Image (cartoon, rainbow, N blue to C red):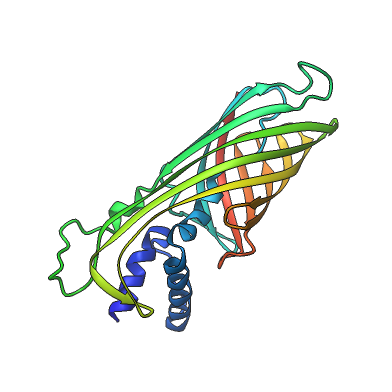
Amino acid sequence: MRNKKLLLFALAAAFLAQPLRAENQFQSFGIQQAGKLLANPPLFFYEFQRNMESTFPLPPGKRFGVNTHLLGGIIIIPLPDVTSVFNFSAKVRVHPESKLAPGIPQVDLVGGYWNSALTSMVVDKNAKTTDTETKLSRAELGGNYGAVVFTSSLEPRVRLFWSYKFSRMNMDIGLSKPEVILGNSVSAFKSELTEHTVAAGLEHTYGENKRWILEGGYGVRNSLLSAKVSWYRKYLELGLNIYPESVFIMQPQLNLHFNF
């Protein structure tokens, strides 16, 4: 029972208040996620950071944009995730397509930052080693990313884009006292993850402020495949992320953006 409670605490930052249908599902889920968390702690949370990272190009004629990730989720159920409470991304166009010479692509610079505010809800600052139950004594999660995006028109309504992105994520989770999880004595999860991702995609404009976007990417450092399809409107983006190596292969998301 103590291990079950510890697993719940350790995963609460990412899945706060998400109901489970049955006890056997909880056990299977907990063991699977705990194994992944112990094997590579920051990689577990980086899955949620990827949902808020945006490497789509700015629409034609726009010079600046801001974006915030509102909801992530699992399967087809959007839910708040660890990155959705406080995050911010910005895009700046540094070169319009064909301005210097015909055929030179549009160039956008992108950057973003997040810091989880959910961790304060699961941390017990008064936790002691003499407590009967193991508690979270600290929990800090955050990350940032930067990217450059190149975009070229294939025809008036279709554009091809490709990008390079650098991501960094930090985590520091401490327990009030050591606890054995899956045969390992654990007192803290503290680590950093960095990733270099190359991606390419197609953008199809089918109406005023209406676009379909398809994107595929590969994380070179950690061998992470990803794909995304998005319905992009004037202020909202509804997307479906596909992570083949993840426990949750399909993760829907909802973003809010303003482009100027």
User: Which of the 4 image quadrants contains residue 207?
Assistant: top right
Q: Is residue 233 above or below residue 2?
A: above
Q: Nearer the viewer, residue 15 or 91?
A: 91
In the picture provided, is 209 more to the left or to the right than 194? right
Q: Position of residue 23 (x, y in %)?
A: 42, 82
Q: Is residue 5 visible?
A: yes
Q: Residue at x 33, y 53 (%)?
A: 119
Q: Nearer the viewer, residue 5 or 98?
A: 98
Q: Residue at x 68, y 27 (%)?
A: 107
The number of numbered badges drawn on the structure is: 0
- For the view shown, which residue lies furthest in the top direction? 100
Q: Is residue 166 above or below residue 82?
A: above
Q: Position of residue 5 (x, y in %)?
A: 31, 74
Q: Is residue 55 visible?
A: no
Q: Quadrant of the N terminus?
A: bottom left
Q: Position of residue 4 (x, y in %)?
A: 34, 77
Q: Residue at x 57, y 35 (%)?
A: 257
